[in-house]
Image (cartoon, rainbow, N blue to C red):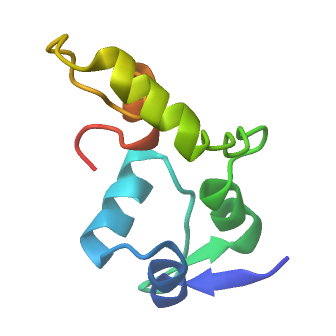
Amino acid sequence: MDFLSSEQVQGALHISRPTLYLWVRQGKLKAQRAGRALLFREEDVRALVRPAGAAKEQPRMSREEALALLRNRQGTGTVLLPYTREELYERHPPGQ
């Protein structure tokens, strides 16, 4: 079982120190104390990067499909988004 330091976890997840400590307080990431330092299990960090059962990236539509979609939507006043509202919140949760 390998452990990572706070600095290593921050670098791997591309987050700041306050965000790391917030995630620990929220229980999103488990930590163990070693004196004043926090240590993190490598498995826990990897699970956070790609959660088990995470959906794979969906294939993108072709250029022709995108142009046909735009042609069909012109003049309708509809805002085109690449994702549904639910998918957008899944990918970018509010407050992060």
Is residue 58 toward the left or the right of residue 10 in the image? right
Residue furthest top as drawn: 76
Instruction: Give x and y (percent) for residue 89.
Output: 37, 31
The residue shown at (31%, 57%) is: 22
Above or below, 58 relative to 45: above
| Residue closer to the observer: 13 or 19 | 13
Tag count in the figure?
0
Residue 96 at least partly seen:
yes
Which quarter of the image is occupied by the N terminus? bottom right
The residue shown at (47%, 82%) is: 6
Above or below, 45 relative to 39: above
Is residue 79 toward the left or the right of residue 36 in the image? left
Above or below, 41 relative to 81: below
Instruction: Give x and y (percent) for residue 5.
Output: 55, 86
Q: Quadrant of residue 77?
A: top left
Instruction: Give x and y (percent) for residue 40.
Output: 61, 73
Residue 90 at least partly seen:
no
| Residue closer to the observer: 3 or 48 | 48
Is residue 61 toward the left or the right of residue 96 in the image? right
The residue shown at (22%, 43%) is: 95
Residue furthest right as drawn: 1
The residue shown at (42%, 21%) is: 86
